[in-house]
Image (spheres, rainbow, N blue to C red):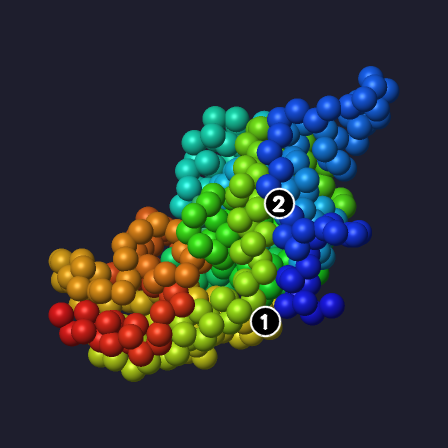
Amino acid sequence: MKSDTLLVSAGRAHGNAVPVNPPVVRASTFLFDSLAAFQAAGKTPFDGPFYGRVGTPTTFAFEDAICALEAGHRSIATASGLAAISATLMAFAETGAHILVVDTVYEPVRRFCNRTLKRMGVETTYYDPTLGAGIADLIRPETTLIYLESPGSGTFEVQDLQAIVAAAKARGVATAIDATWATPLLLKPLALGIDVSIHAATKYIVGHSDGMLGVITTNAAVHDRVRAASQDLGSCAGVEECNLALRGLRTLGVRLERQGATALALAEWLETLPQVARVLHPALPSFPGHALWKRDFTGAAGLFSVELSDRTDGAAARFIDSLKHFSVGFSWGGFESLVLPMHPESRSLGLWSDLGPVIRLQIGLEDLEDLKADLAQALAK
Ligand SMILES: *Cc1c(COP(=O)(O)O)cnc(C)c1O
C-alpha cells in the first residue's frame, strides 16, 4: 500500500460499525471483571487497555498508525516531541557512557545533554553534520548512541545517513534520528537501518498548531529499552492530542505536497534576489547536501531558511516586522506561515560558520503569489 492510501485508514479499528476516525477515549482506570483478568492484562500492559498512562484505545490507534507508516516494530506516543527525544536518550544513558549528537540538533536537546545527561555522568560529543563516514573516528568503546537529525534544525544540513548507519553497525552502536522535518512520509529511517525514529507530532502530524505530541518508533532490537525509559519518565501522550494527530494524518499527504511545492517555488525565487545571500533548502541543487537529500528522501517539507545579505543591526527585525502573512511564533508544520530568526552562531561546527542573519520560514497553505509579494515588499525594506 502506498502512503497516501495508508494515511486514510491507518489506526482504524476493524469490524462492523467502527467509527471512521478513532474517537477520544479518556480513562485513567479500566475495569476488569475478575482479579485473574486484571492480572492477565498486566502481563502485557502495552497490548491493550490496562492503565491510562500506558494508553487508551485512542493512544494505541495513533501508535499503530505511525508504526504502519514507519514500517517499524512498535511506536510509543509521548507528551511532546522533546519527551520522545529525552526518553530515547535516557534509554541509552548510563554512568560513564558516551553519546554522539549532531551539532545542528534541535536546541533543547543540547540543553538536555549538557544539563541532565551530564549530571548523570554521560558525556556528549557534538559532531559535524557533514562528517559522514568520519563518524567512525569519534566512536569510543563506551559510545552507546549516535543521535542524528536531518536536515539539521534551522540550517538544514543533510547528513549522510547511510554512511553513519554503516559505521554504527560496524561498532555495535545504536542510532536514533529526529525525522520531524520529513514526517513519516518523506523518509523511512527504519528501512535505512536506523534503530529509532522520532517525530515531534506537534509539527506536521497534528498539523494545525493546536496540540503538543511526540512519537517514537523503534525496531525490535531496541524496543524494550526505549519503552522502559519512556515508561519510567511517565510523560504519556494526551488522548485528545492523539485524536487530533490521527485527524491530522488523514490530510498530511496533501498538506505536505502543497506546502512543500509552495516552499520550493519561493526558495527558487528567493535565490535569485540580491537581498538574499543564501537559501538553505535541501531540494535546491545549489545546496551542499542536495545529493544526499535526493538519495534518501522522497520529497521536501515546507520549512527552510534564508540568509539575508544585509548583516547590519536591525535588518533582520525590519524584514520580519514588515511581513504581513508570516506571523512570529515557535513551532511549524501547521497550515499558517510563520517566520523566526535562527541563531546558528551558538554552534561551532557545520558548513555555516560564517552565516549572517538566518531567518526560518514555515510555509503554510496560503496562495503562492500572496506570499511572494509579501516577502518581496518586506525584503525591499
Ligand atoms: C519542535 C521540535 C521538536 C520538539 O517538539 P515539541 O513537541 O515542541 O517538544 C523536536 N525536534 C524538532 C526538529 C523540532 O522542530
| x then y, percent, for residue 81 | 51, 44
Q: Nearer the viewer, mark 2 or mark 1?
A: 2
- According to the picture, the residue beneath numbered tag 1 turns out to be 298
Q: Is residue 110 left or right of residue 179?
A: left
User: Residue, x 54% and y 56% (percent of image)?
Assistant: 248
Label count reads 2
Q: Residue at x 55, y 63 (%)?
A: 251
Q: Is residue 124 above or below residue 316?
A: above
Q: Indicate whether 367 appears above or below 188.
A: below
Residue at position x 53%, y 69% in the image: 254
Q: Amino acid at mark 2?
A: Pro
Quadrant of the snapshot with the N terminus: bottom right
Dot 1 amino acid type:
Thr
Specify whether residue 24 is in view: yes
Up the image or down, 30 lies above or below 159; here it is above
Q: Could one spot residue 148 in this view of the protein?
A: no
Mark drawn on residue 264: none
- Would you name the residue on which mark 2 appears? 23
Residue 183, picture quadrant: bottom right
Q: Residue furthest right?
A: 36
Q: CA distance from mark 2 to mark 1?
A: 32 Å
Instruction: Please tell me in which quadrant of the rendered image residue 354 appears.
Output: bottom left
Residue 322 drawn at (x, y percent): 17, 64
Left-right relation of 247 to 266: right
